[in-house]
């Protein structure tokens, strides 16, 4: 089934149920394992989680990776001027919260390993451990 056919069916369903579709606020995404279905459809964001048509989670992981990288930089900067308790508070507020949000969905993907490495890096910063030390 093509993307256009799916859109037509969705519009018919909305109409049959007397619902209005606001195209400015609507994102479309087709989930499929077939390579021809959903091709060219951009990723969709749903409550802070980025979904792609194959549910491979690489787009979401990349978004979180960019956020974590900037937060780790901040953590490294405040390390010099704050106590360990403050650093732990910053870690839980900025890093742990990002990693825990939606982890049930994306945490089992192969791309998630990159984020867990960043988590280890941030834990080493707070603990004052060497970059290659086990965490």
Image (cartoon, helix red, strand yellow):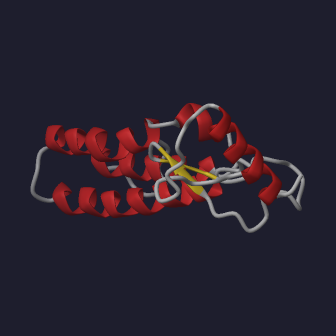
- Determine if residue 107 is in view: no
Residue for point 11% across, 50% down: 82
Q: Residue 33's x, y, as percent?
A: 86, 49
Residue reaching furthest to the bottom: 40
Q: 21 and 108: which one is in front?
A: 21
Asked if residue 25 lies left or right of residue 127, the reply is right
Vertical order, 106 against 23 (above or below): above
Q: Residue 105's x, y, as percent?
A: 60, 35
Residue for point 64% across, 40% down: 15
Q: 50 and 96: which one is in front?
A: 50
Residue for point 26% across, 41% down: 93
Asked if residue 36 lies left or right of residue 120, the reply is right
Q: 6 and 133: which one is in front?
A: 6
Q: Residue 74's x, y, as percent?
A: 25, 61
Q: 134 and 2: which one is in front?
A: 2
Residue for point 78% across, 50% down: 6
Q: Residue 69's x, y, as percent?
A: 40, 62
Vertical order, 17 against 65 (above or below): above
Asked if residue 46 lies left or right of residue 82, the reply is right
């Amino acid at each position: 089934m093509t993307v256009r056919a799916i859109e037509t069916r969705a519009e018919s369903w909305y109409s049959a149920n007397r619902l209005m579709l606001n195209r400015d606020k609507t994102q479309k995404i087709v989930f499929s394992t077939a390579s021809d279905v959903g091709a060219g459809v951009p990723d969709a964001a749903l409550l802070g989680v980025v979904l792609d048509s194959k549910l491979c989670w690489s787009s979401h992981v990349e978004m979180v990776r960019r956020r974590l990288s900037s937060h780790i930089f901040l953590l490294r900067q405040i390390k010099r001027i704050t106590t360990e308790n403050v650093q732990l508070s910053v870690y839980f507020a900025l890093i742990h919260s990002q990693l825990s949000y939606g982890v049930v969905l994306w945490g089992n993907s192969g791309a998630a390993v990159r984020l867990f490495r960043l988590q280890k890096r941030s834990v080493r910063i707070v603990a004052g451990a060497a970059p290659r030390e086990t965490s």
